[in-house]
Amino acid sequence: MIAVFKREFKALFTSPIAYFVWALLFFFAGLYFYSYNILGGQTDLSGVFGILHTISLLLVVPILTMRLFSEERRNRTDQALFTAPVSLTGVVLGKFFAAFLVFALGVAIIFVLAVVIAMFGATPAWASIIGNYVGILLLSGNLIAAGLFFSTLTESQFISALLTFAFSFVLLLFDSLASLFSEVAWLKTAIEFLSVNTRYQEFAAGAISYGNVIFFLSMQALFLFLSVRVLDSRKWQ
Amino acid sequence: MIQVKNLTKNYGSHVAVDDISFSIAEGEIIGFLGPNGAGKSTTMNMLTGYLSATAGEIVIDGHDVLNEPNEAKASIGYLPELPPLYMDMTVREYLNFMYDLKKCKLPRAKHIAEICRIVKIEGVYERLIKNLSKGYRQRVGIAQALIGNPPVLILDEPTVGLDPMQIIEIRTLIKTLGRHHTVILSSHILPEVEAVCDRLIIINHGQIVADATPKQLSEEYSASRHLTVRVAGGEQAVVELVSKVPGVKKVSVLGEKEPGSVDLLIEQADDADVRAELFARLAARNWPILSLRSSERTLEEIFMSLIHQPTTKKNGGVSV
């Protein structure tokens, strides 16, 4: 697992992907920081986190995860991985943590913005910032797991990215779906339960609840498990 | 070292490998031979655990591939048809990655340096794999298979796409490796396996059609006594004359390979030697013999006849 993790992490930086992902994160964080906090004179970073949340879902994660398994399969390098004495779970986890670390480092650097606010003597809303951080890491972890799963399904990086994008898009629309089905009680409850937005907003408000943490972690585990199953099933085709 | 029993692989309704069994002793170099699409790569992918068998059993160095996959995989160095190289890595990075991936315990620097020396890639050690020629990529692929010093090496068409010089080098390399490893090597080129292998397993339509040493094969299949003769003369008249020579069982025309001559394949009766009489009679008519050779069929011809015969036998085919 560690060998795969190390290779993948390095590969994300030898390709433009890690830089591109970081550039997206920094650009949007900087833009919103400038307009909300500097021009608007606020100490509240929720505008920055709001946009990070949206672009992570729609752009960053699909780009970050599109090549994870698609590229291996296209170049037949998966034959080295799957004939080595390593478990599939090890390979999947190695790749997952590499992609997750690239993302986490990117958002960690954005912490500078909170430090900047603190330097000017204002007290940032720490509870909300920490909540946002936990929320965005859990949510994107969940999405990276989903993106990794989609990349096991196809040799094409483009299709892999597109599937992840579509999945994220549906997640963003979930809340409005809930109101659409408001008369069917059980469906509404189900949609509300699955809505990552509602859960994310609780983190953003500074409330870290076990229920939400467990929800996101188990969704991650589910997608990673499905990835292992897909890769394993390919042997039997 | 390797036991394969009743191995079968179906892709949907297509049977890629059909109930094959063989076993390979330690230190043997086995040539896995067959036309494209015969099931060679599928078999190799099953041996290495990349694909799972539909039915059957594979035991590598005492480890069942299904029940102890990691132990079995650790005993195998595998070079797939397309070497599994990461183009964005240097040779050094790649070999170190494979070393980690295979959880190799041998002293790292020394082991990798030795492998590089064996496959002669020291000169490109710091170069990006992307920028290497096909021959060097193939060597890096072999180097990767050698990491961890596995007792079994499985090489899928190791010389495909290389130039003649490189082919000879890789063959010599495989022969050297055969001293310390059990090697299975696949190919659809016969002279290649003939030059390198102790034993040939010929596979066609997913079934084993022959399993023997190159020598056994040529003895078995060229037992019937044939002569090929080229005579300068008219086809019909020559055939007529030759078939009257005592001891000739059958004459078939192979066509005009040189202007004004005809090539004949002569089948002799079991204890007859028709050559002297043939010469005398043709000389009397002033039809010179341009060439005369006893046609021991080359392995190439045997191979062609084996893979073109309909495979009706269910289990194993010819075993010599």
Image (spheres, coloured by chain):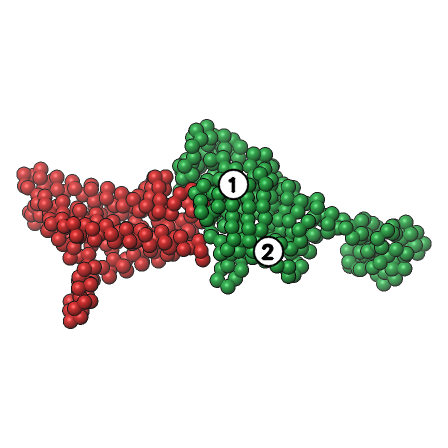
Residue A72 in view in this figure: yes
* Left or right: where B240 falls relative to A41: right
Crowd class of label 1 (few under 14; some 14 to 19; many from 20; radius 10 Å): some
Q: Colour of chain A?
A: red
Helix, strand or loop under label 1:
loop
| Residue under the point 50% across and 49% down | B45
Query: Which chain did the renderer colour green?
Result: B
Tag shown at residue A113: none
Amino acid found under the numbered disc labelled 1: Asp
Farthest-out residue, bottom: A183
Task: State which tag comes first along the sequence, 1 or 2.
Answer: 1
Give the x, y percent position of residue A40: 7, 49
Q: Which residue corresponds to mark 1?
A: B61
Which residue is the site of mark 2? B207
Badge 2 local density, few (<14 within 10 Å), some, or many (20+)?
many
Residue A59 is left or right of residue A8, and the answer is left
Q: Are marks 1 and 2 on the same chain?
A: yes
Answer with left or right where residue A54 lies relative to residue B111.
left
Amino acid tagged 2: Gln
Q: Pick the residue in front: A117 or B102.
A: B102
Q: CA distance from mark 1 to mark 2?
A: 24 Å
